[in-house]
Amino acid sequence: MSSCKHPGEWIPEKVATIFLSLALMLTACGFHRQGVTPMSPVMKVTYVDAKDVRSDFLRGLTRALKAGGTAIAPTRAAASAVLRIERDESGQRVLSVSARNTPTEYEIFYTVTYAVTSGGKEVLPPQTLTLTRDYSFDDEALLAKQHEEGILREALARDLVNLVMRRLASL
């Protein structure tokens, strides 16, 4: 028989024990929030050296680094590692044209090149990643297609952030 006064009544200690047990099980299996990549000790305090501080990729990378437990250093001297973004560019190319010689399909690309140094040594040599997506184009739906292009560009930047974070976590 339970020590509860009323059937179905929970004692605070039992509730706390259940939550503690659940938390221990989740951490024991390597669980972490989706989209959060725990960083290696080398990257605990990182200075990010980039030319374009407003790019979709850099904003996403900075958020992901912080979510992974990395502190962003204001200067190189205060950092344990320097993440250098050497190239961060996106654009589009025409894939196909109609009989009237107007574009009917585009390819969007996003390219980043990055490297990591720590303690004056190159920990990760320059790595280049390029992702592409293509989409159909219709001049009658110009605003919608421009919006679609922006969404695709953001998705490419997000995918690149995930790839870079996985590589940085393995250092």
Image: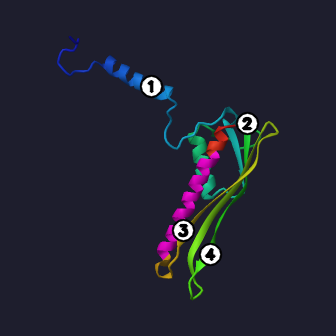
Residue 85's place in the image compared with 147, above or below, is above
Residue 107 pos. (x, y %): 60, 69
Label 3 to label 1: alpha-carbon separation: 43 Å
Identity, as a three-letter code, of the amino acid under mark 3? Glu
Nearer-N-terminus badge (4/3): 4
* Closer mark to the observer between disc 2 and disc 3: 3
Residue sitting nearer the eye, 98 or 38: 98
Residue 16's place in the image compared with 127, above or below, is above
Range of residues picked out in magenta:
143-164
Residue to which mark 2 is pinned: 80
Nearer-N-terminus badge (3/1): 1
Residue 25, numbered label: 1
Q: Is residue 72 left or right of residue 141?
A: right
Residue 94, numbered label: 4
Residue 158's place in the image compared with 74, above or below, is below
Residue in the picture at 50% in, 68% down: 148
* Callout 1 secondary element: helix
Question: Does 20 appear in magenta?
Answer: no
Nearer-N-terminus badge (2/1): 1
Nearer-N-terminus badge (2/3): 2
* Callout 4 secondary element: strand
